[in-house]
Image (cartoon, helix red, strand yellow):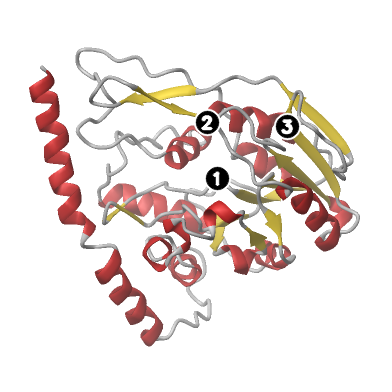
Amino acid sequence: MSPKDITVVVQGPVQTFSDREQELGITQKCLNSVRQFLPGAKIILSTWHNQDLTDLDYDQLVLCDDPGTNIRAYNVDGTPQMFNNNRQIVSTLDGLHHVTTPYTMKLRSDNYLISDAFLHLQQAFPKRCNEDRFFNERVVVINTFTRRYAKGLPVVFHMSDFFYFGRTEDVIACWKMPLIEDFIATKDTPYNIGFPDYSIDCTQMLFIRAMQQFDQSFALNGLLDNNPEKQIFSDRCFANNFVIADPQQVGVGLCRKFVVKARVSRTKGKVAHWQFKEWQQLYKKYCDPNFDLQYPIFAQYKLFLQRCLYVFPARLENKRRLQQRQKKVSVNK
């Protein structure tokens, strides 16, 4: 694969936009990194009107109309929970629709490349199974926010929305969805669907909405909505259509807010994510039984102990919080 076969869609704000703070100079760093590690690739910058584009190196500019924030749920005090999901959909899809190369990368404007390891990963796992095979080739994603556990419990369809690399038609499929309509509170669902369970995570919602074009059985009623059948469905989908690895293994650098003090950058946050070796276990189980998996028992045991320390204890706290959420509703009534 030549870099000339690749278009990189850099999506998002260049400076602080609306209520989203942007690290100074991070988009310039992002664009320069693409030139460094993918010389000859085309760069499409998909951003918003009235952004300062001085000294930014790109090949094509796409200026998007701002759809504004969207309401996904309400807090128990009645205040809305506002998100930028529609902005992400618009800036991503508008950029992707201008791609003419066979391969595409979707890269946030506040992330950057540190290597071209994603090129090897995308081609390194050729075997597929027939069931739940939705893409022409695998799409590489990073495991930051690709959670295996949330609130101490297993979760499904929790796929990161930071980075995608693969066939252009497959990456477009990952973002092919209508804009999200504001959640309308009713007497039966005054706060969120599935209450007192938490709302599904933004990453779960985006993933499900995209994958429903292939299979309408992609659905969740809440963050922790899970059962053995859904877990198998999620695992097989991940194994058969994606490659999941940590940012360094993929070749992606994150902005400061995700690597300095953020929980996602500490051991407590990292061990809740799918690990590359765990994804390889899924690959061996569902796609290639003969795959030579190098995953020592010591490493597996170490990860399990870390989860016993940092992840699983949250189950008790989660149970208490769910009870409190239910009690607050009863009081408000």
Residue drawn 15% across and 55% down?
Answer: 316
Please tell me whether mark 1 sits on a helix, a strand or a loop. Answer: loop
Horizontally, is 227 left or right of 86 in the view? left
Report the amino acid beneath label 2: Asn
Q: CA distance from mark 1 to mark 3?
A: 17 Å
Please tell me whether mark 3 sits on a helix, a strand or a loop. Answer: strand
Q: Sequence order check: which comes first, mark 1 or mark 3?
A: 3
Q: Sequence order check: which comes first, mark 1 or mark 2?
A: 2
Where does residue 63 sit, x and y in percent of width and height? Answer: 77, 26
Which residue is labeled 3 in the image?
Answer: 47
Which residue is labeled 1 in the image?
Answer: 161
Does residue 258 lie above or below 47 as drawn?
A: below
Report the amino acid beneath label 3: Thr
Where does residue 288 sit, x and y in percent of width and height? Answer: 52, 69
Where does residue 214 sit, x and y in percent of width and height? Answer: 52, 36
**In terms of image quadrants, where is residue 113?**
bottom right
Does residue 296 lie above or below 263 as drawn?
A: below
Horizontally, is 256 left or right of 315 in the view? right
Bin the neighbour count of mark 3 within 10 Å (Cα to Cα): few under 14, some 14-19, many 20 and up.
many
- Marks 1 and 2 close (CB-CB < 8 Å): no
Which residue is labeled 2 in the image?
Answer: 85
* Mark count: 3
Horizontally, is 333 left or right of 14 in the view? left
Bin the neighbour count of mark 1 within 10 Å (Cα to Cα): few under 14, some 14-19, many 20 and up.
many
